Amino acid sequence: MEDFVPARKKKQRKTKISLDSSGNQLKRIKDIKFDVCSTQFFTDTVDKIKTILQEKCESGNKPSPELVCYGLGNFAESYIARYQLALLLALREELQIGGGDCEIYDPQFTPEESSLLLELNFQVLQNNQEGKRECSPDTVTIFYMPHCGKALYNNLLWRNWGCQLENVVIIGNSFTHMIDSTPTRILERTANYVIKIQPFTQETPLQVPAQYEDVFNNTSIHTFSCRDLENIPHDLWQNNIEPVYDLTDAEIIFR
């Protein structure tokens, strides 16, 4: 009788989270959104943003804000990106921003992810703006950019360099932390406009609970008041050369 040889188990492949069943994925994201909305963190964040918008929109009789999201990442694979997407959905709903006024882009989105975002009523941008998006002079534009690279913030500031920054609200990496934690030589190459504007920025850190620390750590709301911008030396506004980056440390995907 031949010795018994146990059959080898087939090696299981590591699979990515499937987006084939969009219904299941939508439910997953909406469940996370429900959990986020039930926290004091969300209530406090919404209150802060509403206060900012009330001051900006009512003082200039402006219409409801626009919402632009950059650099979300692959939410099919990353739970951090899924939570960031859930907060974006919750903010859009709470601020009553229509789908037509909410644009989103990441060069790494898969076709399946883009389709799911369309189901969620986002405008999925087709071109890589590299953050060089000029805000509308007629309303406030909220840029939702958690955990983006420094160059993306830098490009956004450059494109809106001047008193029109009053119409910009940035929810993203703390400028203060960015400057304090990054060597000056790197900042000068990748975030020169962040360095210039930081002293004139009103920065409100999000009060992030422990369970969301890795999702929203070092995230702040950044605004720019008309009074502060008008007091900036003219020479600072004149120095507005388009940024050029070294590919090795830019932390950005170019066109």
Image (cartoon, rainbow, N blue to C red):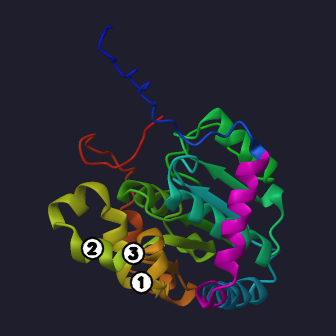
Specify the amino acid type for callout 3. Answer: Ile
Residue lying farthest to the top in this orientation: 1
Q: Residues within 10 Å of mark 2 (few under 14, many from 20)?
A: some
Q: If you read the primary sequence from the N terminus, does the residue marked by circle 1 or circle 2 appear first?
A: 2
Residues in magenta, as a range: 23-44
Evaluate if marks 1 and 3 touch, with contact meaning CB atoms under 8 Å apart: yes
Determine whether 112 is above or below 84 in the image: above
Q: Residues within 10 Å of mark 3 (few under 14, many from 20)?
A: some
Determine the secondary structure under disc 2.
Answer: helix
Evaluate if marks 1 and 2 touch, with contact meaning CB atoms under 8 Å apart: no
Determine whether 191 is above or below 105 in the image: below
Disc number lying in front (3 or 2): 2
Residue 193, how many percent across, how many down? 36, 65
Question: What residue would you read off at disc 2?
Answer: 179
Q: If you read the primary sequence from the N terminus, does the residue marked by circle 3 or circle 2 appear first?
A: 2
Distance, label 3 to label 2, CA atoms, is 11 Å
Residue shown at 65% from the left, 42% from the top:
113
Distance, label 1 to label 2, CA atoms, is 14 Å
Is residue 235 at least partly visible in the picture? no
Question: What residue would you read off at disc 3?
Answer: 197
Q: Residues within 10 Å of mark 1 (few under 14, many from 20)?
A: some
Question: In the figure, residue 165 lies in which quadrant?
Answer: bottom right
Residue 154, how many percent across, how many down? 40, 59
Residue 167 falls inside the magenta stretch: no
Residue shown at 40% from the left, 64% from the top:
238
Question: In the figure, residue 219 lies in which quadrant?
Answer: bottom left
Is residue 163 at least partly visible in the picture? yes
Near-viewer residue (26 or 137): 26
Instruction: Classify residue 5 as left or right of residue 14.
Output: left
Distance, label 1 to label 3, CA atoms, is 5 Å
